[in-house]
Image (cartoon, grey):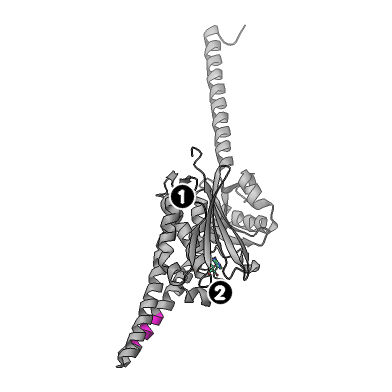
Amino acid sequence: MSLFGRREHDALRSELAIAEARLRASEHDAARLRAVLDTVPVGLVLADAKGKPVMSTPAARRGGHADVLVDDALEHLLADAAAGQAAERRLDLFGPPPRTLLLRGIPLPDGGALGVIDDVTERVRLDSVRTDFVANISHELKTPIGALAVLAETVADHEDVDVMRALAERMVLEAHRASSTIDDLLELSRIELGGEAVYEVVDLGMVVAEAVHRNGLAAERRNIAIVMHDPHPPKAMGDSRQIVSALANLLDNAVKYSDDGSSVTVYVTRVGDWVDIAVADRGIGIPTRDLDRIFERFYRVDRARSRETGGTGLGLAIVRHVANNHGGEVRVESHEGEGSVFTLRIPACTDS
Ligand code: ADP
């Protein structure tokens, strides 16, 4: 005789089915949680009450466990965290590639511990770029402002009108220098943020004309001719204001680093889906060893010459950002004593 009647049997079966469904659901939830944790870029290591790792996410294995130093540091942090003591430690690994990791041990409420491995390499790099940038700006502004203070003090001590006039002229120059640096910094930050970048059909004829116009006076003073090689250039796609700014900076350099009476030529050429805008000069050229660095902010080949000609060291950084914002590039070919060609590549307007 059966211990259960049919009704009890059915009730038991349905309870069993519910329990199975719950188990499946919780297995499903666990699998989902696992899948989610596996996508977290921060490495996670779960440890038991003794601090021994029982589970880790792929990021933890990828970013940390490969290194003995990381293993060692994590072991201590997990042991401390399992004993209720939260702690964190920064590890600088020499690589290659060099990396900086932030390791944390967190005690869990019902025993055990969680280890967190955060790869902060990029954050640390950006921090140092920012610190360098601030130091550079301070230096760049301190120089003309310091000079202004000294000149003003000297003016105050003089009564000779000619001397005072000469000092005043130098004060104007230094004030312009500080103001150009600020203008370029503002332009660079506007372009870097790129928030307001537009994507429109760009008439390169107008763009080149505007950039030439901005440099007209400086070129004229030095009897340098700026020649537009292609009177009917192809159209481009992008942000005309940014392209004018990049081209004006290239022309400014071409004029600045050329001898009086020389000439600068602008070529605009369609190359497949791109337009190349090249600015060629016959100026002093750039030593090969400096070519990789000239696009960095505040980098100058010849600090004295750049200063003498009113350079801010930011022009080519602006050009590089404009190229990047357009998905293009900027290239340079240069030979000392012969001249330079800077080529800005931006998307062509494919309907033109
Ligand atoms: P700057 O304001 O000093 O000209 P840039 O960022 O525009 O700063 O250029 C960086 C450096 O690259 C310049 O200081 C100069 O040494 C070099 N350079 C740029 N363009 C030219 C060029 N056409 N001919 C020679 N040197 C150049």
Q: Looking at the magenta stretch, what is its main secondary structure?
A: helix
* Label 1 SS: helix
- Compare residues 347 and 51 and report the one nearer the observer: 347
Q: Is residue 147 magenta?
A: yes
Please give the residue where the numbered disc 1 appears in the rendered image: 204
Tag 2 near tag 1, CB within 8 Å:
no
> In the image, residue 70 lies at what x, y percent?
65, 56
Relative to 240, say whether 171 is above or below.
below
Give the amino acid at mark 1: Leu
What amino acid is at disc 2? Answer: Asp
Which span is picked out in magenta? Answer: 146-153
Say whether residue 33 is visible. yes
Q: Quadrant of residue 291?
A: bottom right
- Considering the numbered disc 2 on the image, is that residue within a helix, a strand or a loop? loop
* Nearest to the observer: residue 322 or residue 78: 322
The image position of residue 227, as x and y in percent, is: 50, 59
Q: In the rendered view, does 82 fall on the left or right side of 147?
A: right
Residue 336 is situated, as x and y percent measured from the top left of the image, at 63, 70
Is residue 325 shown above or below 335?
Answer: above
Q: Is mark 2 within 8 Å of ligand 1?
A: yes
Q: Nearer the viewer, mark 2 or mark 1?
A: 1
Residue 86 appearing in the image: no
The crowd level at tag 1 (other Cα within 10 Å; few <14, some 14-19, many 20+) is many
Mark 2 neighbour class, 10 Å CA radius: few under 14, some 14 to 19, many 20 or more: few
196 in relation to 98, above or below: above
Residue underneath mark 2? 302
Tell which of 283 and 34 is nearer to you: 283
